Amino acid sequence: MAYATFDPNTGPGLAASVKILIAGGFGVGKTTTVAAVSEIAPLRTEEVVTEVSRTIDDLSGVESKTTTTVAMDFGRITISPELVLYIFGTPGQDRFWFMWDELALGALGAVVLADTRRLESSFAAVDYFERRGLPFVVGVNCFDGAPRYTPEEVRYALDLADHVAITLCDVRHRDSAKAVLVTLLEYLVGRTARHAGSENPPTAFDQTAGSQ
Ligand SMILES: Nc1nc2c(ncn2[C@@H]2O[C@H](COP(=O)(O)OP(=O)(O)OP(=O)(O)O)[C@@H](O)[C@H]2O)c(=O)[nH]1
Ligand SMILES: [Mg+2]
C-alpha cells in the first residue's frame, strides 16, 4: 500500500505504508498506545463494561477498568517521509478474538503488550502470532506500582525465543510508545535483510498462507 506525499525538496512522492497490530490481553494498554502515538484523532470503539459483562469477561487485576475495546483502535504515525504506519489495536476480551484474523490481514508485524501484574493475560497473543508466523516484539508496559522485571526475566516467564525483542515502556508517553514501534520496525527490517535472496521472503500476513 502507498499513498501520495509532497516533499518540498523532491516534489510529489509515494510513502510506503505498513500495517501493524497492537495486541495483548485485557487492559494492558493497547488503546492507550494507539492514542499516544497517533498523529490523527484515533478511532476507538470503547464500550462501558457493564455488570452483565463482568460475569462473562475476566477482569481480574483490572477491576477498576470501566470501558473496553469491542472492535478495534486505529491510528496513523508518519515515521519518515518514506514510511507511514497504520496502527490497529486489537480488542482484549476473549469474546472478541474472532476479529483478530480480520485485523491481522495484511499486517507486517505486531507489538504484544504485557502487564507484569498479569503476564498470563498476554500468553494467548504470543501464541497467536507464533502459530501464524507473524513477527512480533514485546512491550512490557510498566504500570505504576507493578513489579519490575528485566527483559530476560520476562522472556523466561513468557517463554519467548531469543530473537524476540523485549522493550520496557510506559505507553502513556508518546516517546516511549513510539520506541516500541521503532523496535518492531528495526526487527522487521533486519528480518527482511536476513531473508533477502531466499526463495520465501517474508510478506504481509495472509490468512490463507497461514505462516511465513
Ligand atoms: N499507570 C498506568 N496506567 C496505564 C498505562 N497504560 C494504560 N494505562 C491505563 O490503564 C487503563 C487501560 O488502558 P487501555 O489502553 O484501555 O487498555 P486496553 O489494552 O486497550 O484494554 P482493552 O481494550 O479493554 O483490552 C487505562 O485507564 C489507561 O489510562 C500505563 O502504562 N501506566
Ligand atoms: Mg482497548
Image (tube, helix red, strand yellow):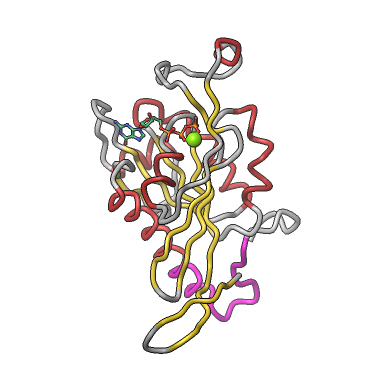
The quadrant of the image that shows the C terminus is bottom right
Q: Nearer the viewer, residue 43 or 187?
A: 43
- Residue 92 placement, left or right of 158: right
Which quadrant would residue 93 be assigned to in this image? top right
Image coordinates for residue 101, horizontal then vertical, percent: 67, 46
**Residue name at image x 64 percent, y 71 percent:** 200
Give the answer, above or below, for where 63 lies relative to 111.
above
Image coordinates for residue 10, horizontal then vertical, percent: 42, 89
Q: Nearer the viewer, residue 4 or 93?
A: 4
Question: Residue lying furthest right in this view?
Answer: 208
Q: Which residues are magenta?
A: 189-204
Image coordinates for residue 166, horizontal then vertical, percent: 35, 49
Which quadrant would residue 54 be assigned to in this image? top right
**Residue name at image x 53 percent, y 79 percent:** 14
Question: Count of labels shown?
Answer: 0
**Residue name at image x 51 percent, y 71 percent:** 192
**Residue name at image x 45 percent, y 71 percent:** 83
- Residue 155 placement, left or right of 206: left
Q: Is residue 196 magenta?
A: yes
Image coordinates for residue 181, horizontal then vertical, percent: 40, 56
Give the answer, above or below, for where 82 lies relative to 85.
below
- Residue 23 placement, left or right of 32: right
Question: Residue lying furthest bottom in this view?
Answer: 10
The quadrant of the image that shows the N terminus is bottom right
Picture quadrant of ligand 1: top left
Q: Is residue 121 magenta?
A: no
